[in-house]
Amino acid sequence: MAGADGDDSLYPIAVLIDELRNEDVQLRLNSIKKLSTIALALGVERTRTELLPFLTDTIYDEDEVLLALAEQLGNFTMLVGGPEYVHCLLPPLESLATVEETVVRDKAVESLRKISQEHSPVDLEVHFEPLVKRLASGDWFTSRTSACGLFSVCYPRVSSTVKAEIRQHFRTLCSDDTPMVRRAAASKLGEFAKVLELDYVKSDIISLFTALASDEQDSVRLLAVEACVSIATLLPQEDLETLVMPTLRQAAEDKSWRVRYMVADKFSELQKAVGPEITKNDLVPAFQNLLKDCEAEVRAAAANKVKEFCENLPEDSRETIIMTHILPCVKELVSDTNQHVKSALASVIMGLSTILGKDNTVEHLLPLFLAQLKDECPEVRLNIISNLDCVNEVIGIRQLSQSLLPAIVELAEDAKWRVRLAIIEYMPLLAGQLGVEFFDEKLNTLCMAWLIDHVYAIREAATCNLMKLVEKFGAEWAQNTIVPKVLGMANDPNYLHRMTTLFCINSLSEACGQEITTKQMLPVVLKMSNDQVANVRFNVAKSLQKIGPVLDSNALQSEVKPVLEKLSTDTDMDVKYFAQEALSVLALA
């Protein structure tokens, strides 16, 4: 009997071994995903003595299986007996951290970082730190890149002698022969600096930062820019000028556009990290250069940061700096040759009006907005229109309305349906800002024209747009302006337009209320139940179901019920189905 019990207890691991040796990758992947169940069945001791050694020995598999294994092991602490035994998970994860596939290595490092928190300080020195050293001095670059991600998690909790060793290993990896290792070290430099004592940041990290920022590989140099933000926030203000700024100035003028792009991309963070004085003296000229860069990607990244940069300038000199240094560059970008640059600028330029105030906006920014509204690139015009609310707060939209109109009309008739769709989405916002008279006079016909667009997505968006407009302008406006035009489409020769009438009625019934729905919309829907096209008839049934709750019981019984009953005996299957569904939903069956 005992023997039988023993056989039973071996069963889970036997099944796992069979599945892990199966030729089918999917089966192997499934068994790895069930590892926690198997570990539970085995119990903590056998998981440690049998399952983990088995997994460590079989790490030669497809990348997706290894990835799943690396992820699973990060959640295994309780399954091996809790924090005191967590070091048992290190051997398989160490192997996974050295494989060739980057995604697997990254996941293994993520799991190692996770379980490092569960090691006691003693276990960290006895088990975890030696693993980091082994990885850091491995023959293959794969293990050395993985080591870079582990220094910062063990450094704060080890003794000072071990700390000195960790710093030495990190220094070695920062000057490794392999660019991939230097890249990994550069990407973790800021993170490592955050856990170091300030003296070591000054003595060790700054020299490493300077070396990496002048590395021969631009992929290493651009990662050093990222580290610059973390390092600058750690140092006292008086040290920034001597320790960080020379390197940052050099990066902003780097010969590789990728490095300059990274500086532009991180500009707001750098600005907050170095403080107002250095911003005024150093970052303003650097930002001007980035806005005038010869590479379009760099100009676009810098243009994206214009509003943020201006917002974060010291208040006492903000307006002067913008007017004398930034605005001249912005004016040039408005007529840039590259559409991505113009588009990036258009998405933020409106925000300057709130910073500069009414007079400056009218005098300096308004001409730029008007120029962008006439730009040949639809994205530029769209970005300006989508940010109109900023300008509306400062100067009111009337100043722009004469130029807005042609731009809106052009976008509304653009050949690309996605552009038409985007402008429809801004219509309720525009309507609210321009007011009902201007809307009725200039934009109403556009909104109705979209209802008969040849693209369904546009017709659908136009229907939603009408509902939002009615919510803004009220039911009386709808009754006089919108409803007659919508109902007029019920007699259109094109059945798609007749269906649009029904979709509009569905959307508008609730916003317009019972009286308008019963007196004006319902008769049209009922009349359309005799349409020749089955698609229209079954949409009549769906519409009646939708507007039913708005109607009173009298109209439901005397007018809706007979029509739905007639449709429920229709020759078309779909019409029958939707009519019966409507009858049961409205409790008329």
Image (spheres, rainbow, N blue to C red):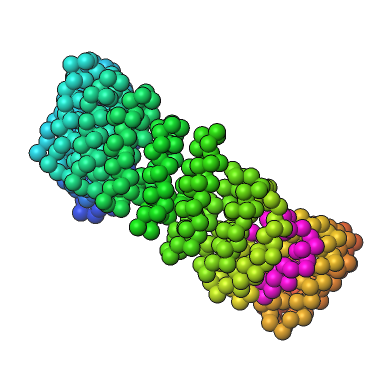
Question: In what quadrant of the picture does the C terminus appear?
Answer: bottom right
Asked whether residue 298 is drawn in magenta, I would say no
Q: What segment carries the magenta color?
A: 426-452
Q: Quadrant of residue 397?
A: bottom right
Q: Residue furthest left?
A: 139
Question: Up-down: is 51 above or below 547?
Answer: above
In front: 235, or 87?
A: 235
Q: Where residue 17 sits: x, y (%)?
A: 20, 42
Magenta-highlighted stretch: main secondary structure?
helix
Residue 10 in view, yes or no: no
Q: Quadrant of residue 263?
A: top left
Q: Where residue 479 sits: x, y (%)?
A: 84, 65
Q: Where residue 50 sits: x, y (%)?
A: 19, 31
Q: Is residue 333 left or right of residue 9?
A: right
In front: 191, or 133?
A: 191
Identified at 52% across, 69% down, the residue is 376
Question: Up-down: is 324 above or below 509?
Answer: above
Q: Where residue 140 sits: x, y (%)?
A: 12, 41
Identified at 60% across, 45% down, the residue is 356
Please state the total of marks drawn on the protein image. 0
Residue 362 in view, yes or no: yes
Asked whether residue 433 is drawn in magenta, I would say yes
In front: 197, or 160?
A: 197
Identified at 77% across, 80% down, the residue is 491
Identified at 55% across, 34% down, the residue is 315
